[in-house]
Image (cartoon, grey):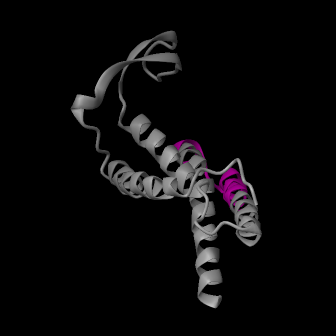
């Protein structure tokens, strides 16, 4: 079966190499509010709304770019892991891939639905930030779990 929308299987290892350290370091940075000073730089912004400063439209501002770096690496790593072919990619694995993606979307939006009902203020912003990444994380977990189950049975 020809799947043009998947990366070659060798990219999965590269994805894991990016994804795991980024996830761990990102959690560390969030928990301990780590922002190294050398990453404080001037960046271009389309729009910035600061509580105690003037809004910026298409201008420069000072920002610690650790969260942007980690966010980009997280997206790249998780996409490479999630959407790289298996070495033995066939129709059954494609079926597992599709079911896992649908399952991840349902779970992701169930969590969002609950957050809309029960989480407020800045805590909701944190839920939304995590929600951007959890759909791929849920997919990766479910897909790899199903593949492992299939290989143990077969």
Residue at x 70% of width, y 64% of height: 97
Q: Is residue 36 above or below residue 23?
A: above
**x%, y% of residue 51?**
47, 23
Q: Is residue 25 left or right of residue 52?
A: left
Residue at x 72% of width, y 68% of height: 90
Magenta-drawn stretch contains 122: yes
Quarter of the image for the N terminus: give it.
bottom right
Q: Is residue 141 above or below residue 109?
A: below
Q: How many marks?
A: 0
Q: Magenta residues, as a range?
A: 107-124
**x%, y% of residue 140?**
58, 63
Q: Is residue 82 left or right of residue 110?
A: left
**x%, y% of residue 65?**
37, 31
Mainly helix, strand or loop, the magenta region?
Answer: helix
Between 107 and 139, which is closer to the camera in this rendering?
A: 139
Between 36 and 142, which is closer to the camera in this rendering?
A: 142
Residue at x 59% of width, y 87% of height: 152
Between 48 and 73, which is closer to the camera in this rendering?
A: 73
Q: Is residue 64 left or right of residue 130?
A: left
Q: Is residue 130 above or below residue 36?
A: below
Between 127 and 45, which is closer to the camera in this rendering?
A: 45
**x%, y% of residue 23?**
42, 55
Magenta-drawn stretch contains 60: no
Residue at x 58% of width, y 79% of height: 148
């Amino acid at each position: 079966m020809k799947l043009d929308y998947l990366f070659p299987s060798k990219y999965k290892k590269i994805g894991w190499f990016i994804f795991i350290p980024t996830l761990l370091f990102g959690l560390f940075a969030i928990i301990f509010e780590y922002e190294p000073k050398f990453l404080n730089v001037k960046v271009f912004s389309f729009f910035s709304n600061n509580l105690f400063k003037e809004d910026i439209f298409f201008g420069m501002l000072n920002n610690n770019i650790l969260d942007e770096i980690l966010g980009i690496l997280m997206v790249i790593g998780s996409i490479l892991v999630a959407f790289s072919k298996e070495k033995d990619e066939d129709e059954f694995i494609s079926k597992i891939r599709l079911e896992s993606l649908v399952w991840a979307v349902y779970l992701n939006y169930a969590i969002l639905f609950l957050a809309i009902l029960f989480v407020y203020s800045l805590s909701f912003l944190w839920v939304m930030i995590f929600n951007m990444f959890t759909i791929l994380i849920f997919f990766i977990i479910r897909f790899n779990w199903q593949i492992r189950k299939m290989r143990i049975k077969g």
